[in-house]
Amino acid sequence: MQRIRQQYVQTTFRFANRTDHIFITLSLIVTVGNMLRFPIICSENGGILFLIPYALCLIFITIPIIYLENAIGQYSSLPPIQLFQYLCPALEGIQSD
């Protein structure tokens, strides 16, 4: 791990402040495709009642997974592809890039 980490120390990106990190994480969650599809999905699945399970899934599943990927990547100082290759070769294709 140390040898792999040393190869990528020069090329890793660090956020300037916490606000940048929050906005980048939100941009991973809220994309243009999601904003265009959301009203259609909402109207097909019960209107306002659809918002409750959607918000719960967003809060308890999506945000923790993105936070976990960011935390592991920051700890190891590796890009997502090399990180998942190192952790488990079978998980190589699950990065959110």
Image: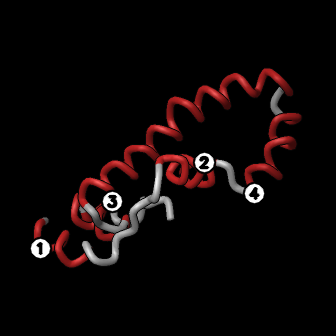
Residue 29 image position (x, y, % from top left): 61, 48
The residue carrying mark 3 is 91
Q: Find numbered disc 4 in the image and state the secondary structure of the residue it sits on.
A: helix
Q: Earlier in the sequence, mark 3 or mark 4?
A: 4
Camera-side residue of 3 and 52:
3
Q: Earlier in the sequence, mark 2 or mark 4?
A: 2
Whichever of labels 3 and 1 marks the residue nearer the N terminus, that label is 1
- Contact, mark 1 vs mark 2 (Cβ under 8 Å): no
Label 3, label 1: how many angstroms apart (C-alpha)? Answer: 21 Å
Question: Does residue 37 lie above or below 12 as drawn?
Answer: above
Judge whether 58 appears above or below 46 on screen: below
Image mark for residue 3: 1
Q: Tell me the amino acid under the disc marked 1.
A: Arg
Q: Position of residue 91 (x, y in %)?
A: 33, 59
As helix, strand or loop, the secondary structure at mark 3 comes to helix
Q: Secondary structure at mark 1?
A: helix
Viewer-proximal residue, 86 or 45? 86
Question: At which x and y percent is residue 57?
Answer: 58, 31
Q: CA gap, disc 3 to disc 2? A: 24 Å
> In front: mark 2 or mark 4?
2
* Classed neighbour count for the residue bearing mark 4: other residues with Cα under 10 Å, few (<14), some (14–19), many (≥20): few
Q: What residue is shown with label 4?
A: 33
Q: Secondary structure at mark 2?
A: helix
Q: Amino acid at mark 2?
A: Leu
Of badges 3 and 2, the one in the foreground is 2
Quadrant in the picture for residue 92: bottom left
